[in-house]
Amino acid sequence: MPVRPTAARPRLTALLALAVAAGALTACGGSGSDPDTVKVSFKQSTDNSVHVMDAYLADVKRQFEKKYPGKKVDLVPIKAPDSEYYTKLQQMLRSPKTAPDLVYEDTFLINSDITSGYLKPLDGYLAKWPDWRKFIPTAKTAARAEDGRTYGVPDGTDTRGLWYDKALFAKAGLPAEWHPKTWEDVLDAARTVKEKVPGVTPLNVYTGKPAGEAATMQSFEMLLYGTGDGRADPLYDTASKKWIAGSQGFKDALTFVETVYREKLGPDVATALDPNIQTIVRGDLLPKGKLAIDLDGSWLPQDWQAGAGHAWPQWSTRLGLAAMPTQRGQAPGRVSMSGGWTWAIPAKAHNPDLAFDFITTLQSRANARKWYIANSGIAVREDVAADPAYVKAQPGIAFFTDLVASTHYRPAYPAYPRVSTAIQEAMEGVTTGDLSVAKAASGYDDALKDATGNQVVRR
């Protein structure tokens, strides 16, 4: 699933959201005591286009009720932006009166819910489910907590790379088959577009707090994880279990962001810091030929399909794809970040066994393949990843699936959301020019200490 922007909201708005959530949840009721009904809560898109998840779950519901006569599935969609969905979901999980039997959890926050005791470990179920052995090992770690237990089953993943407009590249005299080897190659291409094709945005790099996790993951971590030698995690030291401060890689990543906006290679600052920047990029700038290079995710085509919010049938011929290179071209030569969503069972669920049966139906080989294709997702089942029907279903799937071999997952421990916000603040400082790279990096180090209870190590 996409990592969409999370705008900062005043405390009053957050409290009102909680109050509305509580009222709505009381009205719909919790999982109740009916042993034959599994209540499934999930995020419903706020877009008025076709709801891909709704159609998929309705189909799985039909399959499940046919497979298990007498059992029922109650689908409970939560229509909200990501940030409000997280708030409403956590409100539901706190009480057995409102807790559903199955919930859709973003890997971004799943460890926070695990630490709060909201989710049930699934290891006992997984040990008896033969299909679990078919999941890609790195994907299994997405819902594995610090206690070593697994609390969710991933329904796919995503990867990230460089989308580029072939027509704009042709006007700029750049190659139709573009394979940048270093960060400087990317910047040089953007500089060429700026010189040769005035009036378009050369390069989009998400930045700042309004873009939320999109800034952290689509941009900064795609840079940060391309520094160093690729063997050590540049954000979290697994040996000491501490967060890394003072690294040169962090400063180098900030310098890249600073360069993009100082040289006016990116969107104007007001647009870059618009909370709706992701919608602007995929709904306006790319389809209308106003953006040459976009550092972004594998899921973009879901918005361009027929019946979707921004149908654009020409995207597959207009856009090219390139892997994001490492900083200096050092091994492995390319970098990607992966996230995604999981299906998890609340600790206060009334029917956990039935909920896991629903998970196995959701993630059968046939249903998993159907979901990956419909959602422009990347397979986490090895048998589906090798399936020709999946590989050929949509242009770009093979490219983004291939990136899984060189991808990284965020250290999504409980402190991560606050660490992510600190990264966004540092990015915003160099984007607006209010802070130098040195001051922004120093401010991040201070914020990191507060966010992690001083669990930091300097590198």
Image (cartoon, rainbow, N blue to C red):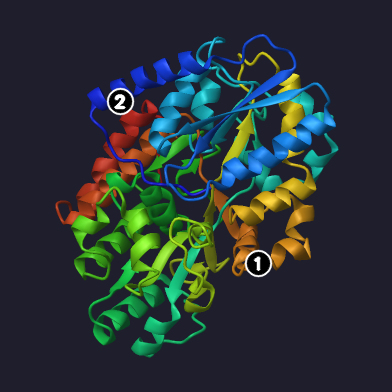
Please tell me which residue is depicted at 65% across the width and 39% down the height of the picture: 57
Query: Which of these two is toward me, 57 or 126?
Result: 57
437 displayed left or right of 139: left
**Residue at 49 percent of width and 62 percent of height:** 304
**Residue 77 visible at all:** yes
Amino acid found under the numbered disc labelled 2: Ala
Residue 251, located in which quarter of the rendered image? Answer: bottom left
Residue carrying label 1: 398
Instruction: Look at the image and tell me whether residue 378 can be seen.
Output: no
Task: Give the x, y percent position of residue 141.
Answer: 64, 40
Q: Which mark is residue 259?
A: none
Mark toward the viewer: 2 or 1: 2
Q: 436 or 172: nearer the eye?
A: 172
Q: Mark 2 points at which residue?
A: 14
Residue at (31% x, 81% y) in the render: 193
Q: Is residue 356 above or below residue 95?
A: below
Amino acid marked by disc 1: Ala
| Residue most extreme to the left | 434
Q: Where is residue 272 in the image (x, y as percent from the top left)?
A: 26, 57
Instruction: Give SS at disc 2.
Output: helix
Position of 35 with respect to 242 (left or right) is: right
What is the x, y in percent for residue 250? Answer: 36, 52
Q: Which of marks 2 and 1 is nearer the N terminus?
A: 2
> From what the image shows, is residue 81 above or below residue 207?
above
For mark 2, does the 10 Å Cα neighbourhood hold few (<14), some (14 to 19), or many (20 or more) residues? some
Above or below, 243 against 279 in this view is above
Q: How many marks?
A: 2
Query: In this rendering, is residue 5 above or below 75?
Result: below
Q: Which sits in the foreground, 218 or 11?
A: 11
Q: What is the CA distance from the residue labelled 2 to the residue labelled 1?
A: 41 Å
